[in-house]
Amino acid sequence: MIRIVASLAVLLVMISAGAVYNLKEATERLEERKRDLATRILEDKAAIKVLRAEMAYLSRPERLQRLSERFLALKPSGNMQMVSSLDQVSGRGEVLTASLPVDNFRLLLPQAKPGDVPDKYRAAPVIVASKAGELQVRAEKPAVQAPKKSFFDRIMVKLEKNQ
């Protein structure tokens, strides 16, 4: 009996030694990975510093001015390029512009929700008895058809009302 207990104790010691060794190896692998990641982070930070320095060097205003003069056909605008009215820009004689204040957008917003239809345009349900004695509910066409206007027409009507 003592031999069985002693052999079980030796077996448990060997299993625990293997588990501790396995844990030690896993810890060393994780520490190695941590060192590699820390090294890569430092290299990336150094590369970012270099890229920022290059960006600062390349985006100097005097360098950009020289490049724009060399490669672009841009010049400062002169007095002859200024226009006094919209007619000169468009090349057309009659240009219609809206004479509304900039912040008067309430005019263009829809006033009613799309689901809000007045009662005179809404179809009323009608209950009809069939030959089999069943009741059926049908919606008849409204007496007055809703006017069909485009969005542009509705805006123009509102503009005319405000003027």
Image (cartoon, rainbow, N blue to C red):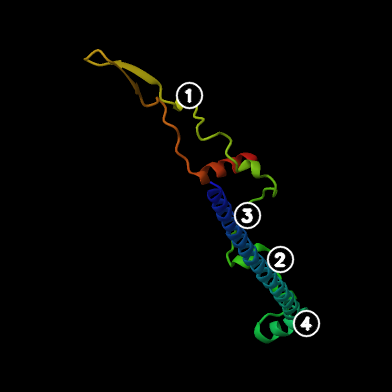
The residue under label 1 is which amino acid type? Asp
Find numbered disc 1 in the image and state the secondary structure of the residue it sits on: helix
The location of residue 30, given as percent across then percent down, is: 64, 64
CA separation, marks 3 and 2? Answer: 15 Å
**Residue positioned 50% across, 32% down in the render:** 115
> Dots 4 and 2: beta carbons under 8 Å?
no
The location of residue 89, given as percent across then percent down, is: 63, 67
Q: Considering only order in the chain, which callout, 2 or 4, is on the residue closer to the N terminus?
A: 4
The residue under label 3 is which amino acid type? Thr
Q: Considering only order in the chain, which callout, 1 or 3, is on the residue closer to the N terminus?
A: 3
The single residue placed furthest to the top in the displayed view is 133
**Residue positioned 48% across, 43% down in the render:** 150
CA separation, marks 1 and 2? Answer: 52 Å
Name the residue carrying label 2.
84
In the rendered structure, find residue 119 and report the number of the disc placed on it: 1
Q: Considering only order in the chain, which callout, 2 or 1, is on the residue closer to the N terminus?
A: 2
Find numbered disc 3 in the image and state the secondary structure of the residue it sits on: loop
> Dots 3 and 2: beta carbons under 8 Å?
no
The residue under label 4 is which amino acid type? Glu
Dividing the picture into quadrants, the one containing residue 94 is bottom right
In the rendered structure, find residue 48 and report the number of the disc placed on it: none
**Residue positioned 70% across, 76% down in the render:** 47
Name the residue carrying label 4.
62
> Dots 1 and 2: beta carbons under 8 Å?
no
The location of residue 108, given as percent across then percent down, is: 60, 43
Q: Are there few (<14), some (14-19), or many (20+) residues within 10 Å of tag 1?
A: few
Q: Is residue 132 visible?
A: yes
The location of residue 12, given as percent across then percent down, is: 57, 53
Which-is-in-front pick, marks 3 and 4?
A: 4
Find numbered disc 4 in the image and state the secondary structure of the residue it sits on: helix
